[in-house]
Amino acid sequence: MSYEHVLAPIEINGLEIKNRVVRTAHGTNIGQGRITDELIAYHEARAAGGCGLTILEAASVHPTDMGTLWLHDASVVDDYRRLMARLAPYHMAVFQQLGHLGYEGVTADGEPPWSASELAGPSIRRPAKAMAQDDIDELVDAFAQAAHWSIEGGLHGVEVHIAHGYLLQQFMSQATNQRTDRYGGSWENRVRLAREVVGAVRDAVGPDVVMGVRIGSEAIGDGGVTEHDCAELVKVLEGDGLIDYVNLTYGSCLRPHKIMGGMHEPPGYELEAAAPVVAAVELPAIVTGRFRTLAEAEELIAGGVADMVGLTRTHIADPDLVVKSIEGREAEVRPCIAGNDGCVGGLNRGRLSCAVNPAVGRELEHPPAGPSPQRRIVVVGGGPGGMEAARLAAEQGHSVVLFEARNRLGGAVRQAQELPTRGLLGDICDWQERELARLGVDVRLNQSAAVESITAAHPELVVVATGATGAEIPDISTMPEGATAVVDDRFGGYEALGLAEWLATQGLAVTLITPGRRVAANALLDLVVQPALERLQALDVDIRTRVDTPPEADLTLTVAKQPHDPLSANLTAAGLNVHVIGDARQPGRILSAIADAHTIDFG
């Protein structure tokens, strides 16, 4: 299709940006505070893929906030220069987001974090220090100094973070600002710090450098910052002549699942809250909201909804999104499935990753495969791990046969995608299936591989990816109306939540139990559990924790995944080279199954 609107250049304060595709700021922790070769390689891969604008992850401007990128001393200037030298050939604009987490920050010296008032952050849970005037002056100077270093290092612009319930919004919000001085009370007082910071940053970079703000509703109510508050502030900042664009977002540290909505959120879920802010100013606007394709961005820009569109997670999944789309290869774009277990879940566990792309943040470890002597590879199992192994082997030029016992590729994912809100899970299997066809893999459906049939193929390597048992959707077609069901979460993943929700939507009275303190405990960091619990509550699902013995019910499902590997021991005994991956090795998630495939040396 034609992408004339999204691929058209745009000029912001004299800077021409080659297209309207944006990677908004997102924490990676790849460099653990610094701009390292790994972090540079991560951004270079997306620059090479055709992105127009990248906004680097929110850099903490002061040691009272040790975030995922630090702008605390002048050494960052040389780091920026190395980054920009590597990105220069691709003509991608690069801005730096400047921020401070406030009461969610971790301080360098172990002292309490800073905030407007002595409140505890929802994650840190440690009362903050209410900032004194000297602290405020120091912070404003730190923002200005960080902005100066960014431009001195060769970046094209800066962006001040006034969103997500972090420090500047903690001052804005009636829910978190209990001050009685000139920074508290009235709306004018509560936005004073944001105005001072933006003004100081503009003074530091001068009138000819692009400068914007990221802003959006906290989505919490109860005195939190609303989209109308944001609209009023950006009108003031525009009227002061301080900003050149606005970057819209949603959610807060109090409702973080709204910042990076999982697959349960529809594309564009943030647009309603963004609209009043976009309408308030004449400035170029960037919108976000779980968009995954260039076609979606084209529609938004053509319809006048925004001037630029954030396609952040989809660029994590496939850095070549833009170039593939331009070349008419949209079907080859590796899809983001918005499961959140790699991106935000990975970050919450220490470092950005991706469920469908194990090379994320490890681009230096995953160079393009060179030519190698062709080998005969057999893969047993057509789930995401097995298909990824077959795809990688075929991509490297090997002859690949894939055995799948079912009549369709995708393995357990094909059941999981039938659960409420989980349909996008199947997209990665659809993509893998297309890639196997494109690469000429010999796929044999309805064939339960045995040692004899495998050895008959004379393989030099056998990959066993036969999955796991213990999280299947039951047949309830014969159950009476009003039947009861218990789902016993012994695994800690999302599976028990999904099964409980599915059973409840089928009309069963459902009790969800776990012997632990939380259901789906291993998925909490993915920001998908709370929305699911809210849906279960609406369906009257009874949720009980610390339960060892399931109550009586017409149906009891114990979710406890176990490896299913009936082949590897016999194959090894037959003298074959065997590699067991995915759930057949250790039950996990799509992320671990696909990542396992990338550990195989196909030779």
Image (cartoon, rainbow, N blue to C red):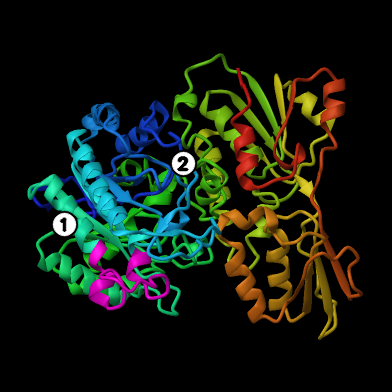
Which residue reaches farthest bottom? 481
Three-letter amino acid code at the position of disc 2:
Asp
Q: Identify the residue at horizontal 59%, vertical 31% (top origin).
A: 598
Q: Which residue is mark 1?
A: 199
Question: Where 531 sits versus 123, above or below?
Answer: below
In the image shown, does 62 or 580 lie closer to the viewer? 62
For mark 2, give the secondary structure.
loop
Q: Amino acid at mark 1?
A: Gly
Residue drawn at x 73%, y 25% as measured from the top left: 457
Corner quadrant of residue 388: top right
Asked if residue 178 lies in the magenta stretch, the reply is: yes
The quadrant of the picture occupied by the C terminus is top right
Question: Where residue 141 sits: x, y (%)?
Answer: 23, 48
How far separated are the C-alphas under marks 2 and 1?
A: 29 Å
In the rendered image, residue 18, in percent from the top left (x then y), is placed at 18, 45
Judge whether residue 8 can be spotted in this image: no
Q: Of helix, strand and loop, which mostly describes the magenta segment?
A: loop
Q: How many marks?
A: 2
Q: Quadrant of residue 496?
A: bottom right
Does the CB distance between marks 2 and 1 fall below 8 Å?
A: no
Residue stretch rendered in magenta on the structure: 169-193
Q: Helix, strand or loop at disc 1?
A: helix
